Amino acid sequence: MSHIIAVANQKGGVGKTTTTINVAAYLAKNGARVLLCDLDPQGNTSSGLGLDKSTLQHGLYEVLIGGVDPASVIVQTKFKNLSILPTTSSLAAAEVELAARQRREYGLQTILQKLDYDYIFIDCPPSLGLLTLNGLVAADSLLIPVQAEYYALEGLGQLLQTVKRVRQMLNPKLHILGVVVTMYDGRTSLGGQVTNELKKHFGSLVFDNRVPRNIRLAEAPSHGKPIVYYDRFCRGALAYKRLSKEIANRVSTK
């Protein structure tokens, strides 16, 4: 049975897609069978793994709205044990089309519960719309990347309220797996202040390993590679390697 992890934060630019790709790649490299579900219409997870979205006949939109078999859409990437349910810009129309459906929050859950992987990561869009709601309803747990900057906590309250409502009304098994600090700069006091503030609010849910600002992490998506296959000795790669172990430990404990 798959453990399904939604990666979400309605604030954009927090390293959500970078975290999704790189944690998934490390878990896959270590032997787990991993599927990435690209729920963001921007499709950055798909392109970050080297897919040419213009060549895709079908994507998540056709699976979610058109009833296409997900097995025919899933792509086995060139990286060990790592597959993706890709998306194209068509997914942007799904919000409107889902709104008219009954049980519209359960579309993605219905799709993913039929798939057999060790981990399924859902890269949610930077909003709290119907697509993200589908991601939260489909997931067992939620991973929240938070940028180590001044406005880090802005909007987190709204996300937590959404999680609370989802748990009460739609998906009682959903829990917060953890909060990961991204774009951390140890040369400034701000990163430490943000981390301490997060620990006040989330306590032990904040992961010990923080992801630093790292140019190699920023370069890797343009080469269509997770950081472990682009520069596995850089600081960003080592951080994600440690973080993936923390995540695997928390999942096994849960």
Image (cartoon, rainbow, N blue to C red):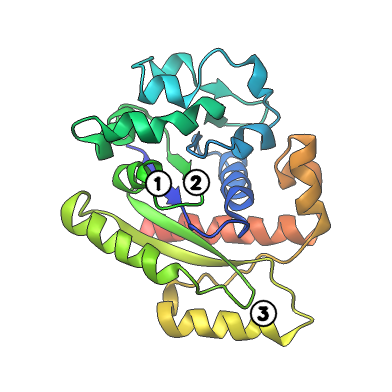
Q: Establish if 23 lies above or below 108.
A: below
* Callout 2 amino acid: Pro
* Camera-side mark, 3 or 1: 1
In this rendering, the label closer to the viewer, 3 or 2: 2
- Residue receiving disc 3: 191
Q: Residue at x 36, y 33 (%)?
A: 96
Q: Is residue 194 left or right of residue 214?
A: left
Instruction: Residue at 50%, 74% (x, y): give it.
Output: 153
Circle 1 Cα neighbour tier, 10 Å, few/some/many (<14 / 14–19 / ≥20): many
The answer to whether any part of residue 254 appears in the image is: no
Label 2 crowd bin: few (<14), some (14–19), many (20+), radius 10 Å: many
Query: Mark 2 vs mark 1: which is more N-terminal?
Result: 2
User: Which residue occupies the foreground of this view, 81 or 43?
Assistant: 43
Question: Residue 125 shows which numbered tag?
Answer: 2
Question: What's under tag 1, amino acid-wise?
Answer: Thr
Q: Which mark is residue 222?
A: none
Question: Is residue 254 toward the left or the right of residue 233 in the image?
Answer: left
Q: Secondary structure at mark 1?
A: helix
In primary-sequence order, the first of circles 3 and 1 is: 1
Residue 55: x, y in percent? Answer: 65, 15
- In the picture, the quarter occupied by the N terminus is top left
Q: Residue 185 versus residue 101: which sits nearer the camera?
A: 101
Q: Is residue 175 among the parts visible in the rendering?
A: yes
Structural distance between the alpha carbons of marks 2 and 1: 6 Å
Q: Which residue has dot 1 on it? A: 132
* Closer to the camera in the image, 89 or 176: 89
Q: Secondary structure at mark 3?
A: helix
Is the residue under label 1 in contact with that under label 2 (CB below 8 Å)? yes
